[in-house]
Image (cartoon, coloured by chain):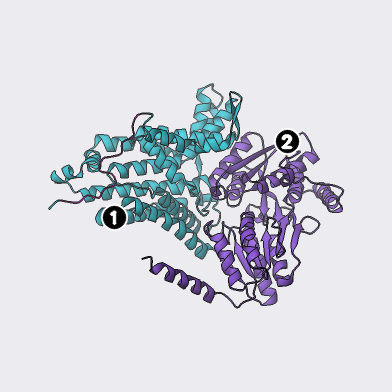
Amino acid sequence: MDVATIVQVLESTLRLATPLLFACLAGLISERAGVFDIGLEGKMLMAAFMSAAIAYVSGNVWVGLTAAVFASVVLSLVHGVASITFRGNQLISGVAINFLAAGITVVVAQNWFRQGGRTPSLSGNARMQRIDLPFVDVVRDVPVLGPIYTILSGHALLVYLAFLCVPLTWYVLFRTRFGLRLRAVGENPAAVDTAGVSVVRLRYGAVAICGVLCGLAGAYLATGLSAGFVKDMTAGRGFIALAAMIFAKWRPWHAMGAVLLFGLLEAVANRFQNIEILGVGVPVQAMQALPYILTVVILAGFVGKAIPPRAGGSPYVKEH
Amino acid sequence: MTGFKPFALTASVLALTAGLAQADSPALMFDMGGKFDKSFNEAAYNGAERWRESTGGSYREIEISAEAQRVQFARRLAEAGSNPIVVMGFANESTLVEVAPDYPDTTFVLIDAVVDLPNVRSVIFAEQEGSYLVGMLAAMATETGTVSFVGGMEIPLITAFACGYAQGVKAVNPDIDVIVNYTGSTPAAWNDPVRGGEIANAQFSQGSDIVFAAAGGTGLGVLQAAEDAGLKSIGVDSNQNHLHPGSVLTSMLKLVDQAVYDAFTEGPDMETGVVVMDLAAGGVGYAVDEFNEHLITAEMMEAVEEARAAIIAGELTVHDYRTDSTCPAF
C-alpha cells in the first residue's frame, strides 16, 4: 500500500464520517437529555431534500443549508411535542418521523420538479465548494507532515465545522451550567425539577439542538458529498450514527473516534472490495456489517458496559 | 378490531377495483424502485405511455412498495380482468410461478427473467452485448489504461453488465485493467449516490479515467463524481448523456420501453415463450447524440459498428455471465 492510497482512503474517511458525526452528536445531546431519538435518519433525509431543493431554486447553497436546518428543527419539534409535551412513546415517535420523511420527500420532490422524486442536479454556487487550506501545494511534498496536511485540506466547510462541534459539545455538556442541567435531566429529572429548573424547557432545547445538527448532516450529504437529492439517499446513516453513539457510550470525544472508525471501515470497503487477511479472503459484506457487529458486542457488555442515561426513554411526569 | 379487519380489506379491494379501467385492458406492474427511477421502471412507463398515445387505449398500473405485495398485486390485476399483464423485474420470477398457473386465460409478460409456463412471455435482454460495445468505446477513449465499473447489488444480472463490459475492453486491448466494484448487498445499494461517488473516487485514485455505472440512483453519484474529477463516465438503461454533457462518454441502452410497447400492442393473443431482446432485435445498444458526439471519434465509431455487425451476424459471441457464472474477462 503506497502513500497515495492511504491518503485517498483517509480523505474518504473524513468525508464519510462527517454526516455520521453531526448525526451522532445530535443523538448524543438529545439522549443525554433523556429523549431517545431514532428519527435521526428521517431528519437527515428531510434536511437533504430541503437543502437540495432550496439550493437549486435559489442557486445558493447557504440558503439551502438554512432551509435544511429549519426543516430538520421542525421535525425535531414534532418529536418534542409528541414525546415531551404529550408524553408519547419516544421510539414510536421517532419511527413515525422516519416514515414521514421517507414518504413526504419523494412526493414533494415529484410534484415540484417532476423528475421522479429527485431534485435536479446542483452545480456552481448551489453546491458546497471544497476549501483548500493555505500552503497546501507547498507542504505537499514534505515527508509525513505533507500527506497529513493534504488529507486535512480540500474539504467542504461543514467537515471542519463537524470536527469543531466535538470540543464544543464536550465543553457545553461538561463545563457549562446548561450542560450540567441537561445531563441531570437525562439522569434524574425530578431532582432538576425540585431545583426549580424546567425539565420541559431543557428537553426542548436539547431536541432543537439535535434538529440543527441533523440539518447540517443532511445538507452536507445532498450538497457537499453529492449534488442533489435522491430518494432514500441517507441509506441507513442515521442508524449507523445511533450505533456510533452507543459505541461511544454517549461521550463526545469517543463519538468522534467511533464515527472515524465507522467512516474508515466504509472507505476501506469502498476501496478494497475483497481483502485478504492472513490468506483468508474477507468479503466486502463483512466489512459493511462490522459497525453493527461492533455495536452489538459493546451492548452485550464484552467491552465495558454501555449504560444509557437513566431517565432516557421515559417522559417526565411532574408529581402533584 | 378483528371484526373490522375483513371489512377494511373488502373496502380496499373494492376501492382498487373501482379505480381501475374496464376489463381486458393491459396492465403494468412496476418493481420496487418505483415508476420514476430514471431508468428501468421509468422506461416501462414510457413504453406504456407511448402505447396509450398511439392507440388511445387505457391501461392499469400499480407500484409495489413491499416484497409481500408482489403476489397480492399480481393476483388483483388478474382478478380484475386485465390482459395482458406486464410484470417488471427479475424478482418477480417467483411471483409468476405462483400466480400465472391460476389464471390460464390471462397472458403475463415478465421482463428480465424467464418463467417457463404456457401463458407467460419472458422478455430478457442481452445486456452483455450492449455492455460489450460501451466497453470497447471505453477502451478506445481511456488515456490511463485503466477503466472501471460500479454495480448496484451484486446479482448475476448486474455481473452480466460487468462481464460484457470487461470483454469489450479486453477485445480492444487486453492490457487495459478493469476495476469492478459493487455498492452493496441490500436494495439500499440502488439509491446511495454518496457511496457511489466515493467508490468512483477510489477507482479514480487507482488510475481509472472512465467509469461505467449500472447502479440505478447510485449511478447518478458516480456520474457526478466523474464530472467533478474531470473524467468520463458511461450511463445505463436510459440515455443519460444529457446529465453531464461532455463528461458522459455514452450510455448503454436497454430498450425496456419497446418490450412493454410491443406487449401492449400485440395484446392477449401474443406469442408466449422466451423473447430475447439482443442487438439484432434492437433491444440493447449505445447512445450517440448531440451531447457526446464530439467525444466519439470516427475510428471509435467504425470499430464499434464493426463489432456490432459481427455480433448481429453471429460471428462474434459475447459470453453471458448468467449461463455459467463465470466470466472469461475477469
Q: Which residues are magenta?
A: A304-318
User: Which chain hosts label 1?
Assistant: A
**Residue at the spot 71% in from the left edge and 55% down from the top edge:** B253
Give the quadrant of residue B92.
bottom right
Residue B225 in percent (x, y) is at: 59, 44
Q: Nearer the viewer, residue B44 or A109?
A: B44
Q: Residue at x 54, y 50 (%)?
A: A227
Mark 1: few/some/many CA within 10 Å (<14, 14-19, 20+): some
Name the mark nearer the viewer: 1 or 2.
1
* Residue located at (64% from left, 54% from top): B90
Label 1, secondary structure: give it.
loop
Percent position (x, y) of residue B213? 64, 47
Dot label at residue A88: 1
Q: Amino acid at mark 2?
A: Gly
In the rendered image, what is the letter of the chain coloured purple? B
Note whether residue B142 is visible: yes
Within 10 angstroms of label 2, few (less than 14), some, or many (20 or more) residues? Answer: some
Q: Is residue B39 visible?
A: no
Please determine if labels 1 and 2 lie on a single subunit. Answer: no
